[in-house]
Image: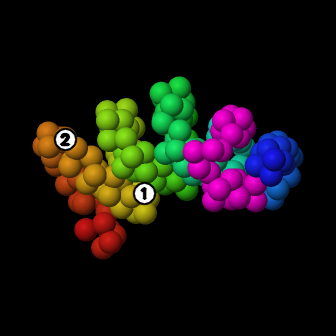
Amino acid sequence: QAQFMATNILQKDLKANQLAVQSVSLNCLAHCVDANTSPELFQKTFQLVHHSKSQIRKKALVTLGLFMVHHYDLIPHHLETIVSLMAKEKSVNVIICFVNFMDLLIQEQPALYPLVLPVAFEMLSKHKSNWLTIKLIHLFRRLVLLDKRLVKKLAEPFLKTLKQTASKSVE
């Protein structure tokens, strides 16, 4: 009964018009997502990926990733939509969060890497953020372990990135 009440409260708070209420609700939900968490909460969270504020989109991505780790059945229906949304995303902070989201999913479901690979390549060439580059290198390191053919494909983009960056942390 307590879980039912919590679900109702979270659903109400996720629909709130106040940024702080939505933010706190997403934080709470991210910490309590498990196999018993209601799929209705997933739907409400999924809607927040379209939110106008990048802070809410970031938190929604984190929560969706945790939902998908516990509910593998949600992945086929929603992952392609999230990937296509993130290909159009302008906020570097949301994109970094998305890279973390992809890394989490690849750890749990390695077979998903073909869906993630094209978007990750595009992000590596399109964005110049040092922090994003570090996160993408970490993701590609994980992907190379899954498919050894990627080493040849990644050599040129990595060398280009290393030549273009002035950051010592990327080198």
Residue 169, above or below 38: below
Is 127 or 71 nearer to us in this picture? 71
Whole-percent x, y for residue 42 in the image: 66, 39
The answer to whether mark 1 and mark 2 are in CB contact below 8 A is: no
Please provide the residue range marked out in magenta: 23-44
- Residue 15 placement, left or right of 91: right
Q: In the figure, residue 81 lies in which quadrant?
A: top right
Looking at the rendered structure, which numbered label has been put on residue 147?
2
Is 126 or 48 nearer to us in this picture? 48
Name the kind of residue labelled 2 in the image. Answer: Asp
User: Where, quadrant-wise, is the C terminus in this rendering?
Assistant: bottom left
Name the kind of residue labelled 1 in the image. Answer: Leu
- Residue 169 placement, left or right of 152: right
Is 128 or 52 nearer to us in this picture? 52
Q: Secondary structure at mark 1?
A: helix
Read off the residue under disc 1: 132
